[in-house]
Amino acid sequence: MAFEGLQERLQGTLKKMKGKGKVTEQDVKEMMREVRLALLEADVNFKVVKKFIADVKERAVGQDVLDSLTPGQQVIKVVNEELTKLMGGEQSKLRAAQKPPTVVMMVGLQGAGKTTTVGKLANYLRKEHNRKPLLAAADIYRPAAIDQLQTLGKQLDMPVFSLGDQVSPVEIAKQAVKQAKEDHQDYVIIDTAGRLHVDQELMDELQQIKEAVSPDETLLVVDAMTGQDAVNVAESFNNQLDLTGVVLTKLDGDTRGGAAISVKAVTDTPIKFAGIGEKSDALEPFHPERMASRILGMGDVMTLIEKAQTNVDEDRAKELEKKMRTNDLTFDDFLEQLGQVKEMGPLDELLEMMPGAGKMKGMKNIQVDDKQLAHIEAIVRSMTKAERDNPSLLNASRKRRIAKGSGTTVPEVNRLLKQFDEMKKMMKQMSGQQKGKGKKKGGM
Ligand code: GDP
């Protein structure tokens, strides 16, 4: 998973600070030495690291921090705030044209994830904002790119504009915008050609497209896995094309995170979206604050809540939350939750967003893969209604019956009962932690 090394090191360092009732300048200096190493190891640009350390130090050794009642926590707060600032501060939303269609031009090197991201962005705009995008195939040099976009369009049931590979990309882009106007599509997302390296010919062509259609957004797609290279690529593209934003892809991989932390600081171009998988729904608006909290192990409660909100009906969610708090969760609720969890995405990804989840007792036992999910479902479905409401009814003979009915074994049934118990405990703990956190809805 992304940021693993960095998370571990930073969290270890910050933990030493956390409970301190008295913090000296020397403490801060020592901590910052470790933070500096952690960032460099995560492939964060060295200039960025230098400035970051200086900024944190200056604020952290200030009188009001060191003299406060909780200096250790105050220092961590400063690190969190500065890390957020580094990654762009406020979330940067997608611009919209005053008069539709909004034109988004997608640029980037080959393999960065451009074509995939065109589909993801279109899907996001429709799903979250009820927009009607037109996808435009202006990468004429890689014939497969046109096919790829057309396939994506079919999968998403969205129109794709193509003039084949014999018409110039500038003309294709112009015609696509015209078509979108005629058809009242409110976004045009243009897929452009990439190369293996930055070269002038490509830049010239992209500049021509840009002049021809004056995009509202020129988004650079970069692969987070390439670390410092991603930052260099962003710098070159920005110098020539005046980017309005960056989409960082493959944040689901085990990137050390350097690109995510340095891109904004080096190029002064905000990261607008993060790609977190190959599928069409694996795109998220980039929230610097949440990313900083995730790196520092403060969890990412907001993202989790939003994910839950798009999948859960509000009243039912409230009811479940109450049950969790009062420990009244039944196996029927559990089944319902499992169904929702399956829709929300891979479990390990969700778990990573929970504050302190990694360290929570019993958490390891709760991690289940999709095949196990099917077993669990079978076991629960083999219980009677009374058993599902009250698992304490389950004696040895009932367990044998359930194991037989679900094609599993008694130890498996026992394991599930134990997991269920642990989950209930954990949920209770979590709902306690989350109380008082306000709801906030992100932008595009
Ligand atoms: P393009 O050459 O820039 O158009 O790149 P493509 O869109 O063809 O993507 C290249 C490869 O990266 C494909 O195999 C994609 O499935 C994959 N990819 C794109 N975005 C992501 C992402 O966010 N996560 C992961 N894991 N893979 C991605």
Image (cartoon, rainbow, N blue to C red):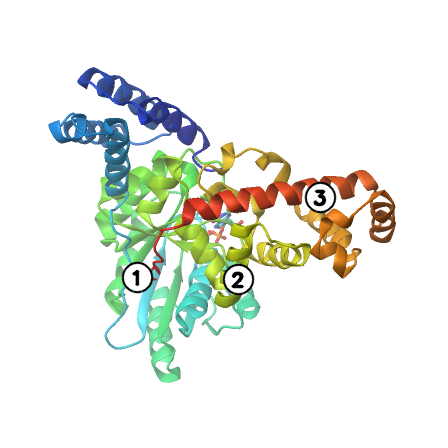
The residue at which mark 2 appears reads as 319
| Residue 349, visible in the rendered structure | no
Numbered mark located on residue 94 in the image: 1
Q: Tag on residue 194?
A: none
Q: Is mark 3 on a helix, strand or loop?
A: helix
Closer-to-camera residue (69/300)? 69
Up-down relation of residue 83 to residue 388 (above or below): above
10 Å crowding of disc 1: few (<14), some (14-19), many (20+): some
Disc on res. 417: 3
Marked residue nearer the N-terminal end (1 or 2): 1
Q: In which quarter of the image is the C terminus?
A: bottom left
Look at the numbered disc 2 and give the secondary structure of its residue.
helix
**Residue type, numbered disc 2:** Glu
N-terminal label among 3 and 1: 1
Q: Nearer the viewer, residue 342 or 236?
A: 342
Distance of label 1 from label 2 (alpha carbons): 35 Å
**Mark 3 and mark 2 in contact (Cβ < 8 Å)?**
no
Q: Where is residue 261 in the image (x, y as percent from the top left)?
A: 32, 38
Label 1 element class:
loop
Give the residue displayed 66% in from the left and 41% down from the top: 419
Q: Does the residue labelled 1 lie within 8 Å of ligand 1?
A: no
Judge: label 3 CB < 8 Å from ligand 1: no
